[in-house]
Amino acid sequence: MKKLLVAAALSAAAISPAVAMATDPAPSDFKNAAKYCKALKSASGSTSFATMFGTKKNAYGKCVSQTAKKTATEDAAQAKTAKSQAVEECRAVKTEGSKNAFGKCVSEKAKAKKAAADKEDEAQQGDRITAAKSCEAAKKDTAKFAADFGSKKNAFGKCVSTTAKQLAAERKAEREKAAA
């Protein structure tokens, strides 16, 4: 019995680092997050950027960390969704032919769906940067800005979030109009 418990403990210890590494963002995610945060900081201004992510000392680091983790989590979820949707589509088509026709179908469709999701992510980041520039300009009219978004510490973040959502909705409406 003791040998079984020792073997189980050793197995768990060996597996834990691998699981932790799978959920941690890759270094390439940090590079992209750093570029995004740098653009967001320049678009929103240092003070507004600091109100969105923390004190002036650590706002940039928090932005990079949050963005990298969010990107890694979204990428994993998008890849999983793309693959499961591709499997269902290929199963529905009942691909016949070579031995690996089903696998090729799934691979091609999953890659296409993941690329579309990545393109949407880039557009959303662009929306957020554009929104930050717009909110920085709107902040100059303090009375209107305070009436629209409040005067608390998170007012600039509310403005960026609301404006970015509006931009995304407009982009979605344009896509649907073009598809019709």
Image (spheres, grey):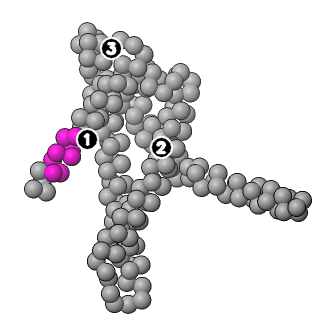
Task: Tell which circle, 2 or 1, labels the residue nearer the N-terminal end.
Answer: 2
Farthest-out residue, front:
1
Residue pictured at 49% horizontal, 34% vertical: 63
Task: Give the distance between the C-alpha atoms of the residues marked 1 and 3, in whole angstroms.
Answer: 23 Å
Residue 33 coordinates in the image, percent (x, y): 47, 43
* Segment colored magenta: 168-176
Q: Is residue 173 located in the magenta-colored stretch of the structure? A: yes
- Return the mark for residue 168: 1
Q: Are discs 3 and 2 less than 8 Å apart at CB? A: no
Crowdedness of circle 2 by 10 Å Cα count: few (<14), some, many (20+)?
A: some
SS for dot 3: loop
Where does the N terminus fall, quadrant-wise?
A: bottom right
Q: Give the camera-side residue of 79 and 63.
A: 79
Question: Which residue position is annotated with label 2?
Answer: 70
> Which is nearer the N-term, disc 1 or disc 3?
3
Name the residue that disc number 3 marks. 150
Q: Which secondary structure dominates the residues rendered in magenta?
A: helix
Furthest-right residue in this view:
2
Q: Residue at x 41, y 78 (%)?
A: 103
Q: Which mark is residue 58?
A: none
Instruction: Please tell me which residue lies in front, 162 or 35.
Output: 162
In depth, the one of 108 and 15 nearer the eye is 15
What's under tag 3, amino acid-wise?
Answer: Gly
Q: Secondary structure at mark 1?
A: helix
Q: Is residue 18 left or right of residue 150?
A: right
Q: Is residue 46 visible?
A: no
